[in-house]
Image (cartoon, helix red, strand yellow):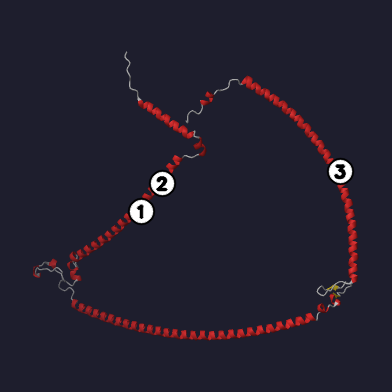
Amino acid sequence: MYKVDLPVDQSIEKAVERRRSAEKARKDQIFNTRLRVMGLDLDALDQQVQEKKHQQNMELRRGRAFDKLREYHDEALLQQDIDEKEKQAALHADLTQYWATNQRVEDSSDADLKCGLKGAFRITIPENELGPASMKIFQGQDIGKEQRRREQMKKTDTDLQAQKEDNERKHVGDKQREMLVSKELVHQDLRGVQLHALEEECKKAARIALDNYNQALAAERAEKLKEQHRREEREKVAEMRHTLTSDMMTECAEAAEREVGGRRLPRVLVDRWKGMSPEQLSAIHREREEQRLNRERQCEAEKIQDAAWELHQLKLSREAEEEERRAEELRREKRIQMDHDNMQLAREQQAHQEFLNKKLYTNKPSKDFFYQFNTSSR
């Protein structure tokens, strides 16, 4: 057997390499500490910004296109409206021309009734050759036609004359009403002018009366001010005279006391009091001395009471210190017992840990055991 070199399929290797590259890029993106902690993907953000700008540009272009389309539709509707109006006008003109040309009143079947036999169809066959079916008027029919026609014409003339007279009377009445209205308007205008003149005279009289009243008020106010100044001057002079002749200025000692009755002490008037008498001063000194002695006795009693209270506080503090010392001794004994128990527990825990490390857990995992985890991003 000869050995033949078969061509190798490179597509499979390229696909595997492409998947490896994608997996590596994915692992770099996921396991990159900077991107994972900070949470920033600049490429994605830039792409989002570009997409946002592109979307805004597309919306702007679409809005402009819609505006142009709306303007085009508006212009088309306006042009359609104009064309429709022109078509209607042309159709109306053609219809009017058709009516005037092909549907004249003179050409209708009842033209003899509407136009007084003008343009009506006339029979050219002699009457003696026509049969009974062509007869229009029979003998003995419509005997009083001429009389009735004359009466109708007379009645028409009478009606026309009555209408003319009625129109003339209406015209005369309208003229008379217009004349009366004109006279009434002229009368109203004259009345308005007279009322305006009377109103101006009344306003002028009211202004004159108001000016006189204001002048009288001003004179009265000036007189009141003068009277007030004179009264204030008299009051000031009387006050000065009273002040100069009062007990305060003359220093009258009896004026400072006033009898109130009812066996009560006389009341002192502070605005007139000039000082105390020697008897009053000596009484005040005696009262002050008595107050001083009472204050000294009170201070001595307070000192004795404070000394007794301090002695009681000292006794209580000593008892509290003794109680605190006993409590501290009890806490110290408890702490010693707790330290002893903790040391015993520490020795037991250390022995248990040595048992675990030296006898139970002797097979430690190597680095290869940990490297087998998180090898893929999936």
Secondary structure under tag 3 reads helix
Which dot, 1 or 3, sits closer to the camera? 3
Q: Which mark is residue 356?
A: none
Q: Amino acid at mark 2?
A: Lys
Q: Position of residue 226 (x, y in %)?
A: 66, 84
First in residue order: circle 1 vs circle 3: 1
Mark 2 = which residue?
Answer: 53
Q: CA distance from mark 1 to mark 3?
A: 103 Å
Task: Name the amino acid, label 1.
Answer: Asp
Q: Residue beneath label 1, please?
A: 67
Disc 3: which residue: 315
| Circle 2 residues within 10 Å: few <14, some 14–19, many ≥20 | few
Distance CA(mark 2)–CA(mark 3): 90 Å
Is 311 rendered above or below residue 82?
above
| Mark 1 closeness class: few <14, some 14–19, many ≥20 residues within 10 Å | few
Q: Position of residue 184 (x, y in %)?
A: 40, 84
Query: Vertically, is 54 above or below 132?
Result: above
**Residue 76 percent location from the top left of the image:** 30, 56
Q: Nearer the viewer, mark 2 or mark 1?
A: 2
Depth check: give the residue in front, 217 or 366: 366
> What kind of element bears circle 2?
helix
Q: Residue furthest top?
A: 1
